[in-house]
Image (cartoon, rainbow, N blue to C red):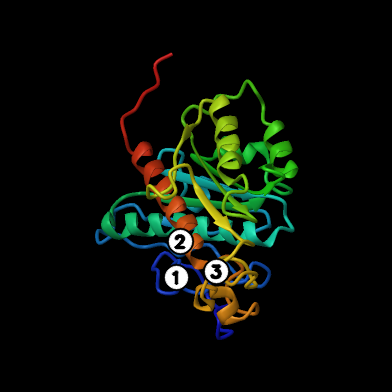
Amino acid sequence: YDANGQERHFSSTGASLPSAAEPLPSLSSVHQQPAAAVASPLDSAPISTIDWPVQGLAHTSCTVSNGCLPSTNVTVLVVYGPEYHTHISEMAWNVATGVHSAFESHIHHHPSSPLHGHIVFGHTSNVTFLDVKDADAVIIGSPVYNGNVHPDVQNWINYWHIDADLSNKFGGAFATAGGIHAGADGTIMSILRSMMVFQMMAVGGDSWTSPFGAVATVWEDPFGDTQRTEYFDSACYYAQANGRQGDHLVHPYFLRKAYGLGERIANVSMAWKNSSYVRWD
């Protein structure tokens, strides 16, 4: 639902997909459905589709029955933890929205491409290592916990099978922190290091201001929910100016970084899938 209480559906036409600057749907009330297909100008050409599963629930598998083939499917897994952490979940939702945007743009510019974009969205309590193995890219988010990755997220990663070959997959990370210098970079690098143990290829954000991934400050001035010092003008406090009952828990400046991270990793994944790369044993 948007800020006016109107129901919003996600489709590959993009008519109702919110951008990073628009109010995002509530994680608890949004109704989603698999995106509709975009037909090619040529009737005989393959159809491109984008699956947008209901978040937090069982997702649709990539199968022949829904037009998804391994050679044309690009699956991006966006996972966060812990389940109850609202700030990291909003960042994750924006990452997934950026992924959707990249898929949609590809279909718009390449209408005859048989791309089947598949977004898997969930938290560490309902996403398994099988989802990691089935994905072309994995983007993991965690709040900073005493300067480190949250135990729920690290424990989830620790159960990956060490002998698994994930060398053809891309990895990305995002985090939320209470302060500007409160361990966010270390948290992101810890996630990326774990990915690189499995030979995954690490991908950063879409600008030099987010080189390792997307990070949001959620408590320290001027990005928190309350003005705690007099050093910044009250106009800086986006959340406070619009009320805590507003559209965002996280400042939109950081939501754009999350959006850009998802968009970039999806684009890299599509380019990689369409390449002629063959791994030499």
Q: Which amino acid does label 1 sit on?
A: Ala
Report the front residue among 152 and 269: 152
Q: Which residue is drawn at 55% across and 69% down?
A: 231
Residue 54 visible in image: no
Q: Tell me the crowding category of disc 3: few under 14, some 14 to 19, or many 20 or more residues within 10 angstroms, Cα based.
A: few
Residue with the most extreme front position: 230
Residue 131 visible in image: yes
Q: Name the residue under label 1.
A: 21
**Left or right, residue 244 beside residue 104:** right
Q: Which of marks 3 and 2 is nearer the N terminus?
A: 3
Q: Residue 256 bears which disc, if any?
A: 2
Residue 238: x and y in percent read: 53, 74
Labelled pair 1, 2 in contact (Cβ < 8 Å): yes
Report the front residue among 116 and 259: 259
Residue 73: x and y in percent read: 44, 44
Local SS, label 1: loop
Q: Earlier in the sequence, mark 1 or mark 3?
A: 1
Q: Tell me the crowding category of disc 1: few under 14, some 14 to 19, or many 20 or more residues within 10 angstroms, Cα based.
A: few
Q: Tell me the crowding category of disc 2: few under 14, some 14 to 19, or many 20 or more residues within 10 angstroms, Cα based.
A: many
Q: Which of marks 1 and 2 is nearer the N terminus?
A: 1
